[in-house]
Amino acid sequence: MIKLQIIGYLGKDAVQREAAGKTVLSFSVAHTERFKSQQGVPQERTTWVDCALWDRVNMAPYLTQGTQVYVEGTPVSDAYKNSAGEAIGQLRLRVYNVQLLNGRRHDDHSKAATAGVLDDDLQEQPADDLPF
């Protein structure tokens, strides 16, 4: 099994769709890597990953633009040529675990409980205890 783990920010709110009789939440996560070139010039490179979370509709209200998340799942990569004939690569992730990393208050957990979100969906991870 190949597993991919990403910590990043949602680029826009998750979109809920129906596919093959099941519900899927689609969202994109961006991770920006900052580094210096050999000449010492600051550079940054942003990688976007399109994510699909199946049968977890209760997470939709929490997967909003700007939310920092930890996601892990099975990666799928696609290559195709765009209309200009340029080779394009796309990284997609079938998510099986998602954790919200933004600072969450106790009252947010109460709201989540009334919305039917499982405790596993709300695992809080303090900013000073990130998994890297």
Image (spheres, grey):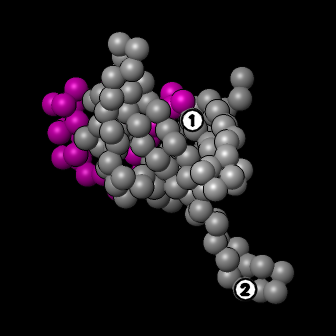
Rendered location of residue 107, percent (x, y): 18, 46
In the rendered view, would you say 80 is above or below 132? above
Visible in this render: residue 12? yes
Residue that appears at 30% across and 43% down? 62
Q: What residue type is labelled 1?
A: Leu
On the image, numbered disc 1 is attached to which residue? 93
In the rendered view, would you say 43 is above or below 81? below
Total numbered labels placed on residues in the image: 2
Visible in this render: residue 125? no
- Residue 20 appears left or right of 75: left
Q: Give the range drawn in magenta.
A: 94-121
Rendered location of residue 69, percent (x, y): 45, 48
First in sequence: mark 2 or mark 1? 2
Rendered location of residue 76, percent (x, y): 64, 33
- Residue 107 appears left or right of 46: left
Report helix, strand or loop for mark 2.
Answer: loop
Other-residue count near label 2 (Cα within 10 Å), few / some / many at <14 / 14–19 / ≥20: few
Residue that appears at 18% across and 38% down? 110
